[in-house]
Image: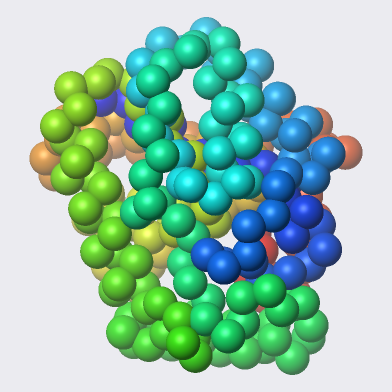
């Protein structure tokens, strides 16, 4: 099975500098639409035969644009929603919040993966969602599967797929409209291809993220 893992195009929340998480459901920005269109052109020759997308509007819009050349069946999967950042959801990424997010991520990298933002979700909890999704994916019997989700969740999903501890999830960056590919035989054998590739997006259409890299 070839997996194409995509982070949604830039959303209006990304553009505004908001930490969205699973509680802020903003549509794509005009630039995000163009990012998705650029990736759609890149993926058009690929024989995609199934699409799975987060129910959040920014992911669903991206999936619709990417799927236009393929008209593959689309499954909206609630396990693909973004990490719940708790009380931080919807807040502007000020310098203070960037520091708080960076501090939490440092604890995650140190192995404190049960720690969550206030009222939010831990990487371990999100990892259970990722594992459930991959288990269902094994039973699809599809050969070229497109998965459209979110920056933080994709990192957790890819770490789970690769059999890495979640403390290593930040090793793969996730930019808006990026493509990562994997050949997976359904068990523990996974071969990465592209990782966070944005070669299809012209430089003037790439999103600018800041601070602690929390939007990247």
Q: Nearer the viewer, residue 123 or 210?
A: 123
Q: Quadrant of residue 74?
A: top left
**Image coordinates for residue 104, horizontal then vertical, percent:** 51, 86
Q: Quadrant of residue 63?
A: top right
Q: Residue at x 48, y 47 (%)?
A: 55
Q: Residue at x 14, y 32 (%)?
A: 139
Quadrant of the image for the N terminus?
A: top left
Q: Residue at x 58, y 16 (%)?
A: 68
Q: For residue 42, say whether it is visible.
A: no
Quadrant of the image for the C terminus?
A: bottom right
**Image coordinates for residue 161, horizontal then vertical, percent:** 27, 49
Q: Is residue 99 left or right of residue 173?
A: right
Above/below status of 162 relative to 65: below
Q: Is residue 136 left or right of residue 58?
A: left
**Image coordinates for residue 157, horizontal then vertical, percent:** 35, 53
**Image coordinates for residue 3, horizontal then vertical, percent:** 36, 31
Q: Residue at x 38, y 51 (%)?
A: 78
Q: Nearer the viewer, residue 55 or 123?
A: 55
């Amino acid at each position: 099975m070839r997996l194409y893992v995509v982070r949604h195009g830039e959303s209006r929340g990304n553009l505004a500098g908001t930490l969205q998480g699973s509680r802020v459901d903003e549509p794509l920005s005009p630039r995000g639409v163009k990012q998705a269109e650029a990736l759609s052109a890149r993926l058009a020759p690929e024989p995609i035969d199934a699409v799975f997308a987060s129910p959040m509007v920014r992911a669903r819009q991206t999936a619709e644009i990417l799927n236009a050349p393929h008209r593959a069946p689309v499954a909206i999967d609630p396990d693909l929603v973004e990490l719940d950042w708790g009380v931080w959801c919807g807040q502007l990424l000020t310098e203070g919040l960037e520091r708080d997010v960076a501090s939490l991520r440092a604890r995650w990298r140190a192995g404190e993966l049960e720690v969550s933002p206030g009222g939010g979700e831990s990487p371990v909890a999100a990892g259970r969602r990722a594992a459930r999704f991959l288990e269902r994916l094994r039973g699809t019997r599809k050969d070229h599967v497109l998965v459209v989700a979110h920056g933080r969740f994709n990192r957790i999903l890819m770490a789970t797929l690769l059999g890495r501890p979640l403390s290593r999830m930040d090793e793969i960056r996730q930019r808006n409209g990026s493509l990562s590919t994997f050949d997976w035989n359904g068990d523990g054998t996974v071969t990465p291809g592209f990782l966070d590739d944005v070669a299809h997006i012209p430089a003037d259409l790439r999103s600018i993220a800041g601070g602690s890299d929390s939007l990247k």
